[in-house]
Image (cartoon, rainbow, N blue to C red):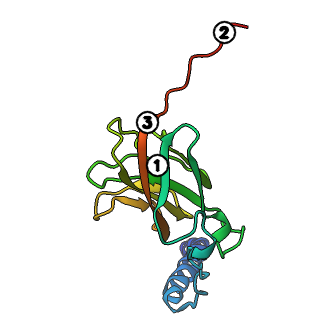
Amino acid sequence: MTQKRNNYLQLRKQRPVAWLLLLFAGVMIGIPHCVLPPPPQVEPDVPTPIFLNLDLIKPVGPGPVLLERAITSQVLFSVASALLNGPNLDLNYYWFIDFDVNNPKQADSTEEDFLLEGCHGSLVDNSGAAKTATLEVLITEGVLAFIFDDNDPRDTLGGEPIDSVRWTIIVSGVPDCAQGPPNDLL
């Protein structure tokens, strides 16, 4: 009888382990049939297109902008007042003079407006011959980068849309860009 009793006690001690194994097996079988809620839908950030009223850019007009090679000759270029999106967009402006895709260089300015002076380094020509130049502004929400996969290597890191405005500039005159010596005779 003691042998039966010992067997009975051993089985009784193993019963909780058997129940745990049975419960675990039941849970594992039921997991594939369990319905979990779908993951939350995350809307991708869609860049806002940029809309410009070309009648409000400065200077406005179909013809070229005339500029003399002189310290006092300057023209203000602006597109900020032409934006139809309103002031809610955080835009970046990249101004280029005669951008060359074969020899790309950083923007001449990243300000909202651009003051082009007749004595700008890329416009001065000592021969006095007239020169035609192109001023271009790229407007985007993104950060401009040079990505050499396309004809124009200027693109944004995040693929944000880029809008651009171009002006043709005719620069003429013999350079009068030297500043006189400072007057120290006071």
Q: Which mark is residue 46?
A: none
Element marked by disc 3: strand
**The quarter of the displayed image where residue 121 is located:** top left
Q: Which of the marked residues, 1 or 3, is nearer the chain's N terminus? A: 1
Furthest residue toward top: 185
Q: Residue at x 57, y 64 (%)?
A: 141
Q: Nearer the viewer, residue 112 or 127?
A: 127
Q: Which residue lies under the disc numbered 3?
A: 175
For the residues bearing labels 2 and 3, Cβ distance under 8 angstroms: no
Q: Which of the marked residues, 2 or 3, is nearer the chain's N terminus? A: 3
The location of residue 80, given as percent across then percent down, is 65, 64
Q: Residue at x 45, y 67 (%)?
A: 159
Disc 2 residue type (three-letter): Asp
Question: Is 61 displayed left or right of 105 in the figure?
Answer: right
Q: Which residue lies under the disc numbered 1?
A: 107
Q: Nearer the viewer, residue 57 or 119?
A: 119
> Vertical placement of 120 versus 133: above or below?
above
